[in-house]
Amino acid sequence: MSHKPYTGAAGGWAALASTAKHLVKSENVAKNLKTLLKTNQDHGFDCPGCAWGEKGNRATFRFCENGAKAVNWEASSRRVNAQFFAEHSVAWLAKQSDYFLEYQGRLAEPVVYNSQSGHYQAIAWDEAFQLIAKHLHRLETPNQAELYTSGRASNEAAFLYQLFGRRLGTNNFPDCSNMCHEASGYALSSSIGTGKGTVTIEDFEMADAIFLFGQNPGTNHPRMLETLAHATHRGAKVVAFNNLKERGLERFANPQKPAEMLSGGSSPTTSHYFTPKLGGDMAAVRGIVKVLLARHQQALLHGDRVFDLNFIKQHTQGLESYLIEVEQTSWQKIVEQSGLSQAQIESAADIYHQSDRVIIAWAMGITQHKHSVATIHELTNLQLLFGQIGKDGAGLCPVRGHSNVQGDRTMGINERPSSAFLESIEQVFGFTPPKKPGHNVVQALTAMLKGKSKVFIGLGGNLVAAAPDTALSTQALANCELTVSIATKLNRTHVTPGQQSLILPCLGRTDVDEQLAGPQRVTVEDSFSMVHASAGLIDESREHMRSEPAIIAGIANAAFGASPVDWLSLVEDYDRIRDLIEQTIPGFERFNQNLQQPGGFYLGNSARRRIWNTATNRAQITCHSLPENIISAEVRALSDNRIFVLQTLRSHDQYNTTIYGFADRYRGIYDEREVLFINPLDIAELGFKEGALVNIETLWADNIERKVKGFKLIAYDIPQGNVAAYFPEANPLVPLMSKGDLSDTPTSKSVAVVLTTSADSEIAIALS
């Protein structure tokens, strides 16, 4: 492993070189280059990567470095077929790296696990569907089935999937959003009446200030960098609060600007950068509000005001109790928990105060803590005090990951569906869907661990690698009587079979989807509630692959016949699925016709129109106290040694659980993933040197050992007491039952750990 601090800007020639390398690596250079030029374009396909939106005037190419990796990875010419599985046992495959598994290529034919031989073997599609139906029919209750969904599923696939599940009789729809932005959905729904962000991509062109919390766009959604660089260029203030110093949040060289590329120049992406402690963002925002409240009170003495009192009076409730809480929160508590000085917080408050239009955006650095819902309520409160919701160039922006994770929720992938949605299902399809809330990811894994859930079906994704507490998650899948994976590539979940297990190969976003009525389009929804069509271009050998809608329809038809719909007829022409979506879900009127619009169509947002779909029909200013401690007293009492707060994160050669390579260029890491980022002062205080190997052990009060070994210390610009490591390698450290209040999101950004030498000798340093 080499650690070479990166001195260049994000993007630029290094990004182009990386794109070229992965293009060659795909072994399909000419076709993939042509394919890339159709990424995120009209009459092309939606990038299978992130959910960042596009402006109407689309450029020659609209993909980023990591989007190119995703496209090349999916468009591999390699194939994993029954012969491959005959040569490699599941036990052997389980010992290989996540990178090795996916690098083998596209899954090429349906296979079933033979527990006696320890190998997967070929199975006919109809036989696979009948096997699934057999297991479903012998369940004691439909709630013994868990229907998992990845955010990459299309709207059409997600709608059929939820209809299948509710026809089965369950609301057990654990999905990837349970592990990332569930806190955003809950917090926003309870405060402004919708779980979606209130901004559009055009709002970033009008904002005076953009406040970013807990996100690393350079790696996770790089197309956002162009938006931020343009904002700073036109004079907007972009203020970042991020635990680590990330190159993408400092400067960016735009590959689409020849002058910038040829001159070696770059543009700043932020004007101010603060590095709070893990879990300290809520305290930082509380401090901003405390500064502005004092100014508001002073202004009132002179007949003026700072807060938007007209908006507050007309649209909100809860102000009085919240402001009392703000006044009672001490600066000592704010500074201690945030890790920022009062002067730093005051400077951020100055920018907010001086800006008429403010966007607040956040990602998983905010959503994966115990107090994540409270933190997002705090962000919302700040915006409500100034009437920033429902104003052009302003609002709230949860930056979601997968390209259709928001669309899946719109389509009904929700373990707690609204009564209005269920009533619509009943009216359109003529059966009564279940009303009892189903399982989220944590609840599903718990049920499988206890043997209460017996069938797992995964529509995409890689649950074992994505979920917390890897050992327990692995055991949960192994406990099942049947596991089914609908997937494009081999992954960790597939080598964790249940008593019986199926892998069903599906088409990807880049593939031509040919059905009886001809080539089909699917649709996706981005982070800005824009819905647009996506049509694949690659028409290579895919004899035994089927589309996700076709696979779901095949399972449903085997289980229920033509009830409540003719499933097989629907997948002959996806327009028929969209007609049903139009009848069922508000906002999709004239669905097929609206898809003809360049760039798709906007679903709308009630809060943007200042319609508050809450119990009181007002936006709720919500009152929470700051956490007593980020790590609870109960956990802190478990060790006398120095306790660190760990966050898991992605490398730059990674998207979610998919590992494209072993370079984290912007952090200067090459050829290694088992590393631990740590403040250099902490290394010195521990008596170590950079590069030393350590074991990392979780503190959690359930007597289960959670430890990973041999991680290399990397000195990095991160607050003292905080450390960071890549997932899925560090997922074994995240306790399954360490979850967010009200959201059940795993607390992957605030795990209490102690470090020991690689020889397991305890570091005898007192708890600071």
Image (cartoon, rainbow, N blue to C red):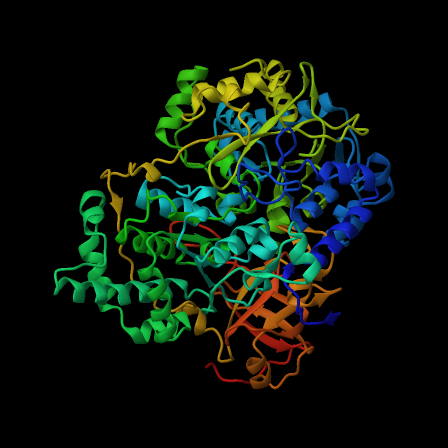
Kindly identify the residue that appears in the image at 58 percent across and 45 percent down: 50
Kindly identify the residue that appears in the image at 55 percent across and 23 percent down: 596
Q: In this view, does 501 lie to the left or right of 630?
A: right
Whether residue 733 is visible here, answered yes or no, is no
| Residue 74 in picture, x, y percent from top left | 72, 40
| Residue 761 in picture, x, y percent from top left | 63, 80
The N terminus lies in which quarter of the figure?
bottom right
Residue toward you, 412 or 192: 192
Choose top left, top right, bottom left or bottom right for residue 61.
Answer: top right
Choose top left, top right, bottom left or bottom right for residue 109.
Answer: top right
Residue toward you, 332 or 638: 332
| Residue 759 in picture, x, y percent from top left | 69, 78
Kindly identify the residue that appears in the image at 72 percent across and 45 percent down: 495
Choose top left, top right, bottom left or bottom right for residue 156.
Answer: top right
Give the vertical position of 222 relative to 249 (above or below). Answer: above
Give the vertical position of 521 relative to 49 (above or below). Answer: above
| Residue 133 in picture, x, y percent from top left | 62, 24
Whether residue 549 is visible here, answered yes or no, is yes
Residue toward you, 758 or 663: 663
Q: Is residue 413 left or right of residue 107?
A: left
**How many numbered badges does the structure rendering display?**
0
Residue toward you, 228 or 65: 228
Give the vertical position of 580 relative to 712 (above or below). Answer: above
Q: Is residue 51 left or right of residue 353?
A: right
